[in-house]
Amino acid sequence: MATKHKDIIFAPVGIDPTKNGKATGAASGKQSPLEKSVDLPAPTAANHKEAGLSKAQLHTMYEQIYLQRRFEERAMQMYQKGKFGGFLHLYIGQEAVSTGTVHALNDDDDIITAYRDHGWGLVRGVTPNEGMAELFGKATGCSKGKGGSMHFASVENHFWGGYGIVGGHIPIGGGIAFANKYQQNGRVTTCFFGDGAVDQGALHETLNMSQLWKLPCIFVVENNGYSMGTAARRHTVNEIHERAKGYGMKSAIINGMDLFSVYKEMKAIADDVRKTSEPWFVEIRTYRYRGHSMSDPQKYRTKEELAEYQKIDPLEKLRGYLLENKLMTEKAVKDLEAKIDQQVLDAIDFAEESPFPENEALFEDMYAGEPYFHDKGNFES
């Protein structure tokens, strides 16, 4: 498909073009001093074998992380061009969390998350075409153009979507876990939310019920350091993962900038939940490279802080690891990246050429089962 969007070339974060494309900082195996200063937990796996990952899995993981990154960079470009409106919350920098978790779970395990959801959709069944079309509000989108950025979903792949209300989906996550336990299907539910949601009452009500009823659910805080513009240390009096103590719930803290750690720890936790049918409360510490949303001026953090975190970019850490350990050749990496770059460009063309939903679609997908009968009125313009 011909494309009209070849005007921008993205320089990978953490790559110095003067050093022949080699990763710098933590991507090259050197620990960033920031990891200690912000109390990122130490990685729990030194290499992919220690994490329990195969070479084939690493290749798939790199493809998924790279797709998430390039998809969102193009989405940002399209937003700035006025191709679509509304909100756009980017996941750039946090891709190790989605990728590592998805590989740690079974394909029929359930996932539900908040509004920073593009990456989750892309690793759980939403195609680039469906995702971009949804951003553009087109009928071919993953939510038929009705959800937009905050409501990616792929129910057939057990991804129950992103939600726009802070913490509003947490009771739904508990409900999915209850349904799984009731049906005795062995599935684990993972419910993700940001550090800003930990002060919502719905979370604490759900944690209490989940522990009381022993629901097979992992509640995961993606702590990216800031609740909009408020640092986590300014809105919580203790370590977030310690809140599990109040419910007698198992808890853990994971380095979300380290892909191997995310996979290893989340797999162990999922296995425990599957075996015991007892919930966990997990804090995964990560970092977003972009603002809370597109309107965020990011005055609450310094350029130096951002630069330090870019040295431990999970995309470039994995790229550097694959090359340095001869798990992929430079040519194979470049060919893969070129293929994905084109997929994303094609997705933009697909979105632009797709139709908007018909007016009657307003009354579809409102309730399960029988159609929603209503006086549809006169839609003629």
Image (tube, rainbow, N blue to C red):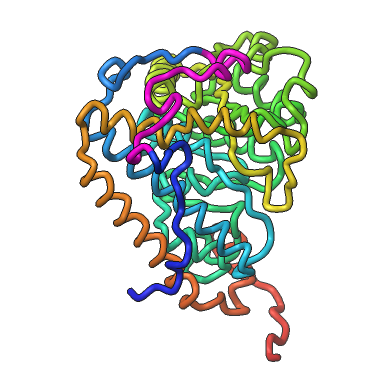
Residue range in magenta is 19-41
Q: Nearer the viewer, residue 239 or 271?
A: 239
Q: Nearer the viewer, residue 317 or 114?
A: 317
Q: The C terminus is located in which quarter? A: bottom right
Indicate the position of residue 87 as horizontal and vertical percent values: 67, 55
Left or right of residue 214, residue 245 in this image: right
* Secondary structure that dominates the magenta span: loop
Q: Is residue 283 visible?
A: yes
Indicate the position of residue 203 as horizontal and vertical percent values: 69, 28
Quarter of image, res 237? top right
Indicate the position of residue 294 as horizontal and vertical percent values: 68, 52
Left or right of residue 146, residue 271 in this image: left
Q: Residue furthest bottom?
A: 381
Residue shown at 59% from the left, 70% from the top: 83
Q: The N terminus is located in which quarter? A: bottom left
Left or right of residue 50, residue 218 in this image: right
Q: How many labels were placed on the picture?
A: 0
Residue shown at 57% from the left, 24% from the top: 285
Q: Is residue 182 visible?
A: no
Quarter of image, res 91? top right
Q: Nearer the viewer, residue 309 or 119?
A: 309
Q: Residue furthest front?
A: 18
Quarter of image, res 39? top right
Indicate the position of residue 157 as horizontal and vertical percent values: 40, 47
User: Is residue 25 located in the magenta-colored stretch of the structure?
Assistant: yes
Residue shown at 42% from the left, 15% from the top: 272
User: Is residue 84 located in the magenta-colored stretch of the structure?
Assistant: no
Left or right of residue 57, residue 354 in this image: right
Q: Nearer the viewer, residue 324 or 185?
A: 324
